[in-house]
């Protein structure tokens, strides 16, 4: 059994923000979401998040993102990390035999699953009461040091300010992340005191208690200190985000995805991309976007919760939100697909075309400057430049149905509810309000009138009017 306690109560004053530190984001996720996802991946139950500063906001944001997965504990006063764990353990049932508690931090997002699994392996192998994550640093200034005895066994953690010159020379530092035997932790928390200069309960004292226990304490040294780096200010937040992006993008490239410029390609953790797809510079893939194989997404395109089939081309600076694009379709450049848009196989959506709750059938085309909202467009239809579906009358939304093989001429206005039958032809510049039967030709424009030789007179009248206005000034 594994219980995870995630400490997320701090204010984060160095962020200089009106928002709790653990709600600041990396890769579209709040910082606290990263340790929660890690705990879920480990099968931890329960997962307890200790909240304090802006507790209601933090709890609401995390509960919304992880419904039914979390318990919350309130640390009303921040009296140290030991006190936070005490608050987190309140209300939990007594530790069962072989139960363990994993202690994580809401502002440490890059800890890997492999590192935490290694904590468990070391505990299994040695039967230790506690296993801590540590790191070795060329300059450990400010960090607590792992003090060992002459046999190399962990004795305690000494904070930098309390360390002797010999202790400050130690390069193994404490990350504050622990896997602890549940019964031992419960007993150790009962022994913590705040008899120190800060009047706080230090979780590091539990390491010393473990060293005194017959089972002892052990460590797992991370090779990359970024794994245990916290985001204390916005500069560190950006540094962590860059490292996270580089790690994720490298994994994508090793899986068979081409990133033309990985340093400026942004792919969130839940995105899935098929092999032989290619992402251009400045591409953002967000949420639960799914990309098929052999897809090309060009510069500056942003996809959120989109589903993209195989062999699709998304040209530069296109925006897709909760949209579906089927195999072989072409989108953009500068296209926008809003929620509910569906583009079927081999259809084309061109520059400055916007779709909202619209289904563009197989092989259909809307190549230029169109708005298609609340519409179904049949297979093989062609929608000309400047066409709009007038789907909203100020009170309700209405459907436009365009049949298969319809040709809609440029600058047409289709006033919903409207149905245009298969094979019909709509003349350019038409405004249509009535149903068009299949294979019909529909005109909805005013009759053209021509007055011979009237243009010179109009110019003279305009010039005279302008001169008169100039005199008045």
Image (cartoon, rainbow, N blue to C red):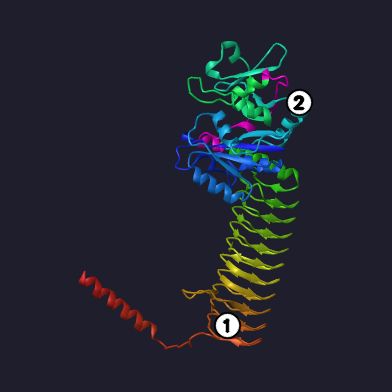
Kindly report the distance in space between the C-alpha atoms of the residues bearing marks 2 and 1.
Answer: 82 Å
Q: In the figure, is residue 344 to the left or right of 399?
A: right
Residue at which label 1 appears: 427
Q: Quadrant of the N terminus?
A: top right
> Residue 356 got which mark?
none
In the image, 372 versus 466, the foreground residue is 372
Residues in magenta?
Answer: 211-238
Name the outermost residue toward the right.
125
Element assignment for label 1? loop
Element assignment for label 2? loop
Residue 429 location in percent, x, y?
A: 53, 80
When the figure is inspected, residue 318 is found, relative to residue 49, above or below; the finding is: below
Q: Residue at x 62, y 25 (%)?
A: 188
Residue 53 location in percent, x, y?
A: 48, 39
When the figure is inspected, residue 33 is found, relative to residue 95, above or below; the finding is: below
Q: Quadrant of residue 98?
A: top right
Q: In the figure, is residue 397 to the left or right of 211?
A: left
Residue at which label 2 appears: 127
Residue 63 location in percent, x, y?
A: 58, 49
Q: Earlier in the sequence, mark 2 or mark 1?
A: 2
Question: Magenta includes 221?
Answer: yes
Confirm whether residue 224 shows in the render.
no
In the image, 46 versus 386, the foreground residue is 46
Q: Residue at x 67, y 19 (%)?
A: 211
In the image, 401 versus 17, the foreground residue is 17
Q: Residue at x 66, y 55 (%)?
A: 289
Residue 320 location in percent, x, y?
A: 60, 59
The local crowd at label 2, few if under 14, some if 14 to 19, many if 20 or more residues have their Cα within 10 Å, is: some
- Foreground: disc 2 or disc 1: 2
Confirm whether residue 201 shows in the render.
yes
């Amino acid at each position: 059994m594994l219980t995870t306690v995630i400490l997320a109560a701090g204010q984060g004053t160095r962020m200089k923000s009106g928002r709790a530190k653990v709600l600041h984001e990396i890769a579209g996720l709040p910082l606290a979401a990263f340790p929660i996802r890690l705990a879920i991946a480990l099968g931890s139950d329960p997962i307890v998040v200790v909240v304090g500063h802006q507790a209601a906001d933090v709890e609401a944001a995390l509960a919304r993102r992880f419904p039914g997965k979390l318990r919350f504990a309130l640390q009303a006063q921040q009296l140290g990390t030991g006190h936070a764990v005490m608050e987190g353990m309140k209300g939990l049932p007594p530790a069962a035999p072989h139960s363990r508690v994993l202690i994580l931090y809401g502002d440490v997002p890059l800890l890997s699953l492999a590192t935490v699994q290694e904590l468990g392996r070391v505990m299994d192998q040695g039967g230790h009461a506690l296993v801590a994550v540590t790191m070795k640093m060329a300059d450990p200034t400010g960090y607590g040091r792992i003090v060992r005895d002459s046999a190399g066994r962990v004795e305690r953690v000494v904070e930098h300010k309390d360390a002797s010159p010999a202790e400050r020379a130690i390069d193994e530092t404490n990350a504050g992340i622990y896997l602890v035997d549940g019964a031992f932790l419960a007993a150790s928390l009962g022994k913590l005191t705040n008899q120190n200069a800060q009047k706080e309960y230090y979780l590091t004292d539990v390491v010393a208690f473990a060293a005194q226990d017959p089972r002892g304490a052990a460590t797992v040294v991370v090779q990359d200190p970024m794994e245990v780096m916290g985001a204390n200010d916005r500069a560190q937040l950006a540094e962590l985000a860059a490292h996270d992006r580089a790690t994720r993008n490298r994994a994508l490239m090793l899986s068979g995805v081409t990133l033309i410029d990985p340093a400026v390609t942004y792919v969130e953790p839940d995105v899935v991309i098929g092999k032989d797809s290619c992402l251009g510079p400045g591409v953002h893939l967000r949420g639960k976007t799914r990309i098929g194989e052999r897809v090309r997404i060009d510069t500056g395109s942003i996809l959120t919760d989109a589903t993209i089939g195989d062999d699709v081309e998304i040209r530069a600076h296109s925006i897709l939100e909760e949209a579906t694009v089927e195999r072989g379709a072409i989108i953009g450049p500068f296209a926008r697909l809003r929620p509910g848009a569906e583009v079927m196989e081999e259809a084309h959506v061109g520059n400055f075309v916007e779709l909202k709750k619209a289904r563009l059938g197989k092989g259909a085309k809307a190549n230029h400057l169109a708005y298609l909202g609340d519409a179904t467009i049949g297979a093989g239809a062609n929608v000309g430049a400047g066409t709009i579906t007038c789907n909203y009358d100020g009170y309700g939304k209405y459907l436009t149905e365009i049949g298969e093989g319809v040709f809609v001429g440029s600058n047409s206005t289709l006033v919903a509810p409207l149905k245009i039958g298969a094979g019909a032809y709509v003349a350019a510049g038409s405004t249509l309000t009535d149903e068009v039967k299949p294979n019909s030709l529909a005109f909805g424009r005013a009759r053209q009138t021509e007055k011979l030789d009237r243009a010179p007179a109009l110019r003279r009248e305009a010039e005279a009017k302008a001169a008169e206005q100039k005199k008045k000034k």
